Amino acid sequence: MTDYQQLDQQAKQIIQQNDRGTYTIPTAGLYPYQWNWDSALTAFGIAQYDLKRAWQEFETLFSGQWENGMVPHILFHQQDDGYFPGPDVWDTKQKLASSGITQPPIAATFIRKLYEKDQAFGTEYVKKLFPKICRWHEWFMAHRLEKYGIAVTHPWESGRDNAVEWDQPLTRVDISQVGTYQRRDTSHVDADMRPTKLDYDRYLSLVYFGRDNQWDESVIRAQGAFRVCDPTMSFTLIRANKDLTWLAEQIGEKTERLQQITDELSDAASGLWQEDLKSYTARDAKDGAFANAISNASFLNWFAGIDNPVALESLQKIMAETPYAVPSHPASAETYDANRYWRGPIWVIMNTMIAMGLAEQGHADLAETIRQKSEDLIIKGGFAEYFNPENGAPAGGGNFSWTAACWLGWVSPTARQEG
Ligand code: GLC
């Protein structure tokens, strides 16, 4: 018999151990700062036991918002030498030290979840955060909207750092000036679970390019080597913008502009559909080339409120290839790797968003299958960063905040009882 209460307790303890007062780190050692979309998901977990602290997670995240509206992917609240590249490498010259890129904009979606738990309590928070989220969404529209959805300028922005979709576009990145550096990630986690040296050189080259151009989005747009329309960014922004529209209605704000953003984004993102793969995939903004690779982000269309029966068949087919699901890259693909970062393993956070979307779009059975498989993984392997789709083995960092949070908010039977 599974002791669900004990697992709930353990999940809560993990988040509390990773709590740094006003924000939560993903896991000690490997990720010692505040990450953008980790915080949004972690707040969703915290909201199950401490709503005030959950709201604070967002207040801290938005305290790092740039003048231009961008909300950075990492906030370096306190220097930690165990992580590279740190604030000195990014050199963004912001009041609160940060990276120079963003991450999937899921804040509005999970802010809505917090608000729905207690509207009276949440109203003041929503009123304060609403204009900030609007500015962030407008930043995407001004600087990242392309013909085929929202573009990322660095693989790290997508939140799926090492995904197969970036392989081809990354070949444009010049690594001749990268020089020597000391990686930190491989001192915390096995090297075969992490990106290769060549990939890392390219990641750094892109960081140096942004830094050398003072993180000016117009220069990055015109001259940056990497610009790829990404299903994660595009679908999460559509979803978040719909949730923001709903929140606007609740607090009596105008909704016209938000609706217009949703329409423009939805039109563009339909260009991510790759007919021969029967899936949404990333697409190079420079030449329109499809990434030709399915990922778990391919199935965020339901999360964005977009139903698609052909995509549903693809998802079912891929889920049938391994005992656990949803893999970040299908086991049948040549480029699949069961252990390496975002090239095969399962992320419970992605399962949560995929299944939330499926359930909302009338596919409750499939959503429940994904939830059940997520439950099996956590019972067997604990609150790991990610999991092997073949044997369910935990991989990457342990005691991970967002895995614990998704347990509390969605996977655990306790969460379901609460509805
Ligand atoms: C890795 C993941 C990214 C996440 C970060 C912190 O970089 O790819 O999605 O936000 O770790 O957990």
Image (tube, rainbow, N blue to C red):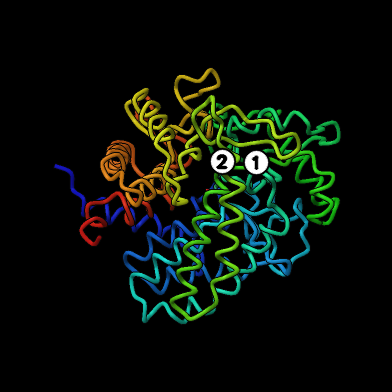
Q: Nearer the viewer, residue 294 or 117?
A: 294
x, y percent for residue 357: 39, 49
What residue is disc 2 on? 160
* Contact (Cβ within 8 Å) of mark 1 with mark 2: yes
- Residue drawn 62% across and 62% down? 137
Which part of the image, by quadrant, shows the N terminus? top left
What residue is disc 1 on? 155
Q: In which quarter of the image is residue 419?
A: bottom left
Q: Nearer the viewer, residue 414 or 127?
A: 127
Q: In this view, does 337 lie to the left or right of 365?
A: right
x, y percent for residue 267: 59, 49
Q: Is residue 157 left or right of residue 350?
A: right
On the question of residue 215 being in view, the answer is: no
Q: In this view, does 303 lie to the left or right of 261?
A: left
Does the beta carbon of the residue at mark 2 sit less than 8 Å from ligand 1?
A: yes
Q: Earlier in the sequence, mark 1 or mark 2?
A: 1
- Residue drawn 82% across and 54% down? 218
Question: Mark 1 and mark 2: span between their CA atoms?
Answer: 7 Å
Q: In this view, does 417 lie above or below 283?
A: below
On the question of residue 276 being in view, the answer is: yes
Q: Is residue 255 above or below residue 231?
A: below
- Residue drawn 37% across and 59% down? 45
The amino acid type, in three-letter code, at marker 2 is Arg
The amino acid type, in three-letter code, at marker 1 is Pro
